[in-house]
Amino acid sequence: MKKLHKRFDAFLTNIIQEHEVSKSEHHRDLLSALLSLKEVPDDDGTKLTDVEIKALLLNMFAAGTDTSSSTTEWAIAELIRNPTMLGRVQQELDSVVGQDRLVSELDLPNLPYLQAFIKETFRLHPSTPLSLPRVAAESCEVFGYHIPKGATLLLNVWAIARDLKEWSDPLVFSPERFLPGGEKSGVDVRGNDFEVIPFGAGRRICAGMNLGIRVVQLLTATLAQAFDWELADRLDPEKLNMEEAYGLTLQRKVPLMVQPKPRLAPYLYSQST
Ligand code: HEM
């Protein structure tokens, strides 16, 4: 553990030093915003230290990378398994964004089908299926079960989102349920509707939820806009193995092997931003 801590510390120190050297007025990002808070105190008069900035970066790497990338991998698998849905996502992108530029974060609110598709991905493939462990601060009773003070609790987010009492055909992947007229049209994944809480809920809800949702939406939208997708070796999409591996985050048991085929003009693939 100590060795790992040293390695991470050196890695993060390096990132901060590189950023301080290449500081530019024109290029502002999250790290430059954090670094500026070392000099300027916030409303409470506190300044950030290097240790705090490193802890924040480590949080982002540890909590934000596997979760976002595995959800996107499941989303692409669902798009490949459901070619009609891929067609509908692409059609929406073509009509809202067009084919002359890549989709951007600003387009996301105008892509209702994509949003419903991502909600359904979060429902069936929550990247943290048992959420994070909680410890009961006081003894209490929940639905007749006695929870003693100090007990460790795990919340089965995965099972809740497949509960037959809450969902019709819960094992069927159906973004339509979140669209107007669908059984869950007003339901969101941001911790207010307890039947689908991939980010947890309450005061310890995922701290990076908004970033996580945007990253998964934008990555999936970009990959769907820029490519048509086929399985490697021309495997039949209906036979795609959707088994889950056992672990803290919900990974695919068999990695997704795909063959992307560009569907936009070549110059769009060489843009740096
Ligand atoms: C698809 C993306 C993500 C999913 C599904 C996800 C899911 C979760 C879940 C289920 C929890 C536990 C919440 C609870 O116990 O109620 C959590 C906690 C947390 N997440 Fe995320 N997360 C994602 C992305 C991110 C990102 C991008 C960041 C940071 C940039 C992040 C930072 C955190 C932190 C710091 C906590 C602990 C919060 C606390 O205990 O107060 N997560 N996340």
Image (cartoon, rainbow, N blue to C red):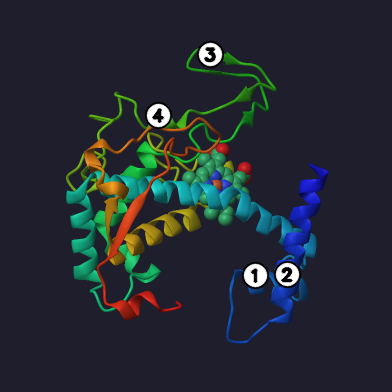
Callout 1: 10 Å neighbours few (<14), some, many (20+)? some
Relative placement, left or right, of 209 versus 183 is right
Front residue (pair 236, 144): 236
Callout 1, which amino acid? Answer: Leu
Q: Examine the image and state in which quarter residue 21 appears.
A: bottom right
Q: Which residue is mark 1?
A: 31
Closer to the chain start, of discs 4 and 1, is 1
Q: Which residue is mark 3?
A: 145
Q: Which residue is mark 2?
A: 16
Closer to the chain start, of discs 3 and 4, is 3
Tell me the CA gap for discs 4 and 1.
37 Å
Tell me the CA gap for discs 2 and 3.
49 Å
Q: Nearer the viewer, mark 4 or mark 2?
A: 2
Tell me the CA gap for discs 1 and 3.
46 Å
Query: As drawn, which residue projects farthest toward the bottom?
Result: 25
Front residue (pair 192, 105): 105
Marks 4/1 in contact by CB < 8 Å: the verdict is: no
Please state the horizontal and vertical placement of residue 205, each as a whole percent of the image: 54, 44
Q: Is residue 232 visible?
A: yes
Closer to the chain start, of discs 2 and 3, is 2
Marks 4/2 in contact by CB < 8 Å: the verdict is: no
Say above or below: 130 vs 10. Answer: above
Q: Which residue is mark 4?
A: 160
Callout 4, which amino acid? Answer: Ile
Assign a secondary structure to mark 2.
helix
Please state the horizontal and vertical placement of residue 245, each as a whole percent of the image: 47, 32
Q: Nearer the viewer, mark 3 or mark 4?
A: 4
Residue drawn 24% across and 65% down?
93
Relative placement, left or right, of 148 versus 120 is right
Callout 3, which amino acid? Answer: Tyr
Closer to the chain start, of discs 4 and 2, is 2
